[in-house]
Image (cartoon, rainbow, N blue to C red):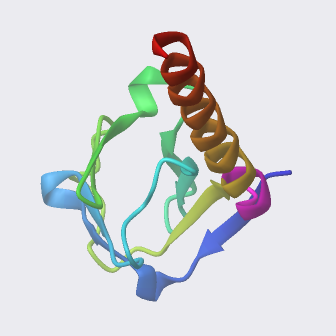
């Protein structure tokens, strides 16, 4: 089950002139953490929506470059940032399953070669 989390304003910095948001979450936003929606609460505008290309963006090294034009917004505007975190149990079980499958392939290959 995925858990939805709202990030604190201490977890990001909003730079509307460059249309970027820097995330200060540790270590970095991972594949199992997915940005869902970002809303500018001052203007009540959705500036990022994972399901909409015009409100999408590119996340690289914890810096999200937005498609939405935020240049008229203020650096002091508060954002509501909602992410979906993959259940850690599900994530670890998936990794264990992948490792087991790889180990099984190696054992079968070794047995076939003997």
Vertical order, 101 against 113 (above or below)? below
Residue 72 at what x, y percent from top left?
A: 24, 54
Q: At 46% across and 13% down in the image, what residue appears?
A: 113
Q: Residue 69 occupies which quadrant of the picture?
A: top left
Residue 80 at what x, y percent from top left?
A: 57, 66
Q: At 30% across and 34% down in the image, what residue appears?
A: 67
Residue extending farthest to the right is 1
Q: Nearer the viewer, residue 31 or 38?
A: 31
Magenta stretch containing residue 89, yes or no?
yes
Q: Nearer the viewer, residue 112 or 31?
A: 112
Q: Residue 51 occupies which quadrant of the picture?
A: top right
Q: Is residue 86 left or right of residue 58?
A: right
- Can residue 78 be seen? yes
Q: Residue 57 occupies which quadrant of the picture?
A: top left
The range drawn in magenta is: 86-91
Residue 30 at what x, y percent from top left?
A: 45, 56
Q: At 58% across and 48% down in the image, what residue appears?
A: 37
Q: Nearer the viewer, residue 51 or 110?
A: 110
Vertical order, 17 against 9 (above or below)? above
Residue 8 at what x, y percent from top left?
A: 54, 82
Q: Is residue 106 left or right of residue 56?
A: right
- Can residue 86 be seen? no
Magenta stretch containing residue 107, yes or no?
no
- Characterize the magenta stretch by its predominant secondary structure: helix
Q: At 49% across and 23% down in the image, what residue appears?
A: 110
Vertical order, 32 against 52 (above or below)? below
């Amino acid at each position: 089950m995925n858990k939805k989390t709202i990030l604190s304003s201490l977890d990001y910095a909003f730079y509307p002139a460059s249309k970027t948001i820097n995330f200060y979450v540790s270590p970095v936003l991972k594949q199992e953490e997915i940005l869902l929606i970002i809303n500018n609460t001052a203007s009540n505008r959705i500036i990022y929506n994972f399901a909409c290309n015009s409100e999408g963006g590119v996340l690289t090294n914890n810096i999200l470059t937005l498609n939405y034009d935020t240049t008229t917004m203020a650096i002091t505007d508060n954002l509501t940032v909602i992410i979906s975190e993959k259940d850690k149990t599900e994530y670890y079980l998936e990794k264990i399953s992948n490792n087991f499958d790889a180990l099984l392939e190696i054992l079968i290959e070794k047995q076939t070669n003997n």
